[in-house]
Structure formats: structure tokens, C-alpha cells
Image (tube, rainbow, N blue to C red):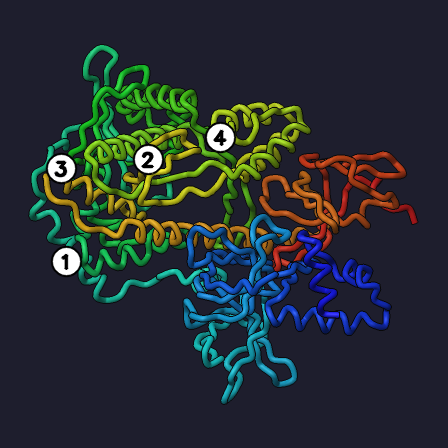
Amino acid sequence: MVHKILQLLKDHDGGLSFQSLARGLRILQREKPLLKKRLMELEDRGLLLRVKRLYFLLPQTRVIRGRVIHVGRAFLFVQPEKNSSPDVYVPARHAAGAVMGDTVELVHSEAGPAKGPAGKILRILERSKNSVVGIYRADWGRPYVVPYDSPSREEIPLTVPGPAPAEDGEVVEVDRATGRVVQVLGFLEDPGVDLDIMVRKYDLPEEFSAEILAEAEAVARSGFDDPGERDDLRDWDVVTIDGADARDFDDAVSIREEGPDRFLLGIHIADVSHFVRTGSALDREAYRRGTSVYFPEKALPMLPEVLSNGACSLKPGEDRLAVSVLLDVDLKGEVHAVRIRPSWIRSAARLTYEEVEKFFTGEGGDPGRRAALSHGLSRMRALAEQMRRNRVESGSLDFSHPEPRLRYREGILVGVEPFLPQEAHGLIEEFMLGANQAVATFLKDREVAFPYRVHPPPALADLASLRSQLAHFGISLPPPEKVAACHLQAAQEQAQLRPEGKYLSVQILKSLRLASYASRNAGHFGLGMSLYTHFTSPIRRYPDLLTHRIIKHVLAGEAQEDIPLSTVARVCSERERRAEEAERELLEWRIYRFLRSRLGDEFQGFVVDIRRAGLVVELEDLFVTGLVRFQDLGDDYFERDSEISLKGRRTGKTLALGERLDVILASIEPDERRMLLVPADRSFVSHV
């Protein structure tokens, strides 16, 4: 039987289900248990791989080492040690309890049902962290924990030598090696417990050591004693523009008239590198963290608060050290000259996005303050709009999408609102983009190494899929190999004119790859720039801090430090991704838990996927999805009518991707991020 199984799978590269194997081998019903046993034996020997419902032949044992770089709810991804190999998709049942950062050994197939290779973890070679968090349970005196850290959610038996360490249902932290409870965090609904879970799940550095805090205090006190040679710009009208809840200000802007139709645009960035010196304990800690992490009620800063919110922060009315990028620019947004200098600045005002937005729209505000700021903000507004127009015309993507903003009352989540950046956000973003590009050009022209911010073009297969889908809505794209950012921008603009615009915008965004840091330049597809770096946020991003150091070495005529740029770029990219995933997961989890109070309520949604079990519907302005089962679509039988739609065999009713659908929330499992929805339209409901 074994030989026949292997031969049959060899003839079917796309894999076979159990039933297909049974039919192909002419297995009788009574022989199916034996077939299952043989298949399990072949899996254990590494000769075949089961992914979801399909079995794949591994003609030779494909055992590789890699590291877990992403953990989803029902899967994880492993990055092979050879970085040139694609990441390997591992479904939850084959995760073997692995968590983020673990080094594992896995067997994989080059062609899985997911895009790219799929695999099964054989064993964990090196643990990235010593503990996991999960829900404490005790059934019939047998204590165990159901972990949040791994998609497998396999129960971990606990070693409990004495009395029960926690109550049933409490969240606990468990030592992975000994199985002992090391800390009880409390019940999930207790304030801050879900945030504690995210901190531990993603192994985010939280508290600073006494050594780090002492060094930060010392440099904060002494940092202004020897500022070095700097341009004194303290009499310039410099302002910061940030969110109302911002605490650290690492960028400020100014504008001065330099002649007819010419301006000197100043982008002034906190000189963090003056305080955080190479090789210091502070520097090592900043590199270990890589980035600040922002949760709704708590931030995990890259630097201690005495620096991030103190000596380095560009607070109004206080002398601060900066690195200033001065752009000689005309009314057409064309830059004629660039000057980069260490500087002294003193912010004249701390403005919020909301305040600037009201100024632009002519709403309210203090009349005296409005008059004082009127001239500078008006010029900045006109210049930012022209720079944005130039960028889009040169091939940059320029579409933003709403993001969830949680609304709390007395610490309790009471609502979810869509937040879309407005013109004031765009003004600052445009100036920061200009500064980053100017710095990258400055360093490239001087032939020094620095960390690039790169964004590769979408994969051809993803573009082919997007092109096919857009075509169903009358939107055309060139062949995948000829697609540029400007084509996606045009598609986005066309999509916005259609009822399915929100869905199509998301599909365009999904086709894009992630931006990252790199030691070699590969251009930035999304921005349409051949050269780009990060410079404008050194308080919260380590690559920006590193770029500052390199600039100052160049300006001082000093030899560049020997920096392992490829390693730094890889580590910082991973830290950035880890922070973003933690922030996103906490928001999503809280939304699902919030919706428990909305059972039976009606929502507007739109269809985002068609699966074997039914339609996946995203709830409008809530940013989470649920399933409408086919069996809940009435007594009709729906079958594929096209790549994007289904059609009822009896009624002729169609359901298509992007289509609006009013639904009722029937059930929800927040921990699993699952919801069951039913159509609100009674015509879908079966007649009994």
C-alpha cells in the first residue's frame, strides 16, 4: 500500500485529499482506517505532508531550519535560515507549540495550497523566550494552560506541586521548560490584562533596567553642556504639529520667504544621537527594542521617558538640539538646494492636527493665535499640496484608508470609529517624505553606507490575481510585469467611483509587499522613489537614530563607523513588524470582545471573500470579519458564477465580492476571532 500511495501522490503535484486517495487506490470502506494509519506513518517519516485536507509527496526529505517570524490565529510563518528561500506557511495543527522567534526544524513542500511553500514543524530547536501566557484550566485535578502565544492552542500540562496557583479562567504566565506558573496576571476582563498578554506574547521589552535609567538621567542633565558646533535657529518661527495625545515631539517645521516665489522649508529633527552615543548601554537597549510600541493606554518607548519626553523632545519655548534639513524650494515644489546642519531650535508653538485642520477649514480657534500662525501655515499648506501633486505625478501611490480608533469612557470601550488622516496629517507627512528623500540623496552622493528604506514591487502572481479581479469591475491594469505604482494609483481612483470601492481599495493594498530596512538599495515602489531612507523619527525608530549618526560623521569629515548594516536592517525590520502586529492584534481583539454586547444587532457589511463554508463579511467601520454560512442563505443552492460571484440555482440571486450585505450578529468567539453572521434580508431566510 505504501508504494501505491507514494506513486499516486507523485502523479498529482497539487496534492490529493483522503477521499481522492481512497478512490485512486480503490480502498474499501473497511480498509480506510488502515489507509489513515499508513498516511500518518509516512508523515512521521517525512515522506509526505498534510496541509489542510490535502496530502503532498515529498520526493526527498525536505528538512530545514528556520525561525518563526509571524504568528496568526490559525497559522504561522517560518523564515528559513537561508534568507533567499521563501517563508514557509505552517497551519496551526502542525505548529507543535512554536511561538514567535523560536528556531525550529520543519519538513516542507515547495507547493502548498497557500501561496508558496507549506510545512510541518518537527521540533523546536531553540526557544526565543522562556515563558508563554494562556488561560489556566483544571479538569478533574489535571491543571493545564491554553496558550495565546501559539496558533496550535495545544494544552500545556502544568507542574503544580502545591495548592492551585490560580483560579480557573485566570490568565497566567508559565515557564516553558518546567511547566510551572511564574505569574498570575488576572482575569482577561481585568483592566490591562489583555495588554499584558500582548507584551508577553510578542516578547516586547517593557521596563528599563536601573543601569539604563541612570545613564539616561545623566546624559539628560549633561547633554546640553557641550552641544558642539551648531547653527543657531532659535529665532526662527518653528512649530511642532502632532496628535493631541502625543507626548514626545521629534519633528518640527518652519518656512521662510527667500525671495520671489522661493522659500526655505525647514524640517528640524530631534538630535537624539547627541544623547545616545554608539556602544553605550542606552544604545544597546535602543537597538534591542528597535522601535517604540504604542497601545491605546500605554506606550513602550524605545528610550527612557527622561529623554523621549524630556531632553530630546522638541517642547515649545525650550532650547533643543536638532538636525535641520533646509530645503530651498519654489512654488512649484521643486527643490533647488539642500542644507543639512546640526542646530539649536526653540519651538514657538505646539500645534495639534485638530487645531491645524480647524485653521484650514476656518472653524473656531483663538483669533489671536490664528492671526499669528496664519501666514506660515497658509504657505506650508500650499507648498505641501504642490509637493504631494508632484509626488503623485512622478509615480507615487497616494491613497490612505480608514483605521480603527477605539473610544473609551472611564476606561471602558464604548465604541469603534473609523479614522482617516486629514489635510493637517498630510502636510507633515509630505514634509517628512521630502526630508527623508533629501537625506538619502545627500548620503548616496557622498558614497557612504546607510540603512535604506525599501519597498519592493508586488509579486507578479499577486498582480495577476489583482488584475483579474479588477477586470470584473471594469478596471484595467497592464500585464503584471509592466505594472508601476502609477497604474495602481489610477486603479484606486477608478475604484473609488464604484459602490465596491472600499473592497477594491483593500484588495489593491493587499497586493503590496511590506516595506523594510536594507543595507542595499532596492527603491521604494509605493513612493515611486528610487532612493529613500528614514531620518525623521529618531526618538522612536532605531534606523533613524543610526542615520543621524552617519550624517554627523559625514558633516564632521570623520571616518564612518564600521556598522553591520545588513544585520541591523534585518533586526530593525523584524522589530517593526513585531510592534505593528502586537498593536493591530490588541485593537482587533478588543473589537471582537466589544461586539459580545451587540449580539442580535444589525450591521452593514460587505463581502470580502468566498470560502467553502460561506461568505466572509467585513462589518462596516468595525474592521473585523465574520462568516455567513451557505446554510443560512435560505433554501437556495449557491454555486460559482464567476471568479468573484455566486448565483442561486433556484432564485438566480447573485452574491459578489465587494457587495454590500446587511447582517445580524448571531454568535461570537472573541478569543478565536470568529463571528457567525446571518443575513438581515428576510428573503434569504429559509421558509419552514
**Image mark for residue 555:** 3
Looking at the image, is mark 4 or mark 2 nearer the viewer?
2
Looking at the image, is mark 3 or mark 4 nearer the viewer?
3
**Residue 387 horizontal side relative to residue 104, left or right:** left
Q: Amino acid at mark 3?
A: Leu
Q: Amino acid at mark 1?
A: Ala
**Image mark for residue 415:** none
Q: Give the labeled residue for mark 2.
A: 532
Which sits earlier in the primary sequence, circle 3 or circle 2? 2
Q: Residue furthest right?
A: 688
Q: Position of residue 558 (x, y in %)?
A: 10, 43
**Residue 507 horizontal side relative to residue 351, left or right:** right
**Residue 476 horizontal side relative to residue 366, left or right:** right
Label 3 – label 2 distance at C-alpha: 19 Å
User: Which residue is at 66% across, 73% downward?
Assistant: 41
Callout 4: SS: loop
Query: Does 499 appear above or below 225?
Result: above
Query: Does 565 appear above or below 63?
Result: above
Q: Give the labeled residue for mark 4.
A: 399
Q: Position of residue 572 (x, y in %)?
A: 34, 51
Structural crowding at the residue carrying mark 1, measured as other residues with C-alpha within 10 Å and reported as few (<14), some (14–19) or many (≥20): few
Q: Give the labeled residue for mark 1.
A: 218
Q: Amino acid at mark 2?
A: Tyr
Label 4 – label 2 distance at C-alpha: 19 Å
Quadrant location, the N terminus:
bottom right
Structural crowding at the residue carrying mark 2, measured as other residues with C-alpha within 10 Å and reported as few (<14), some (14–19) or many (≥20): many
Label 1 – label 4 distance at C-alpha: 44 Å
Q: Amino acid at mark 4?
A: Phe
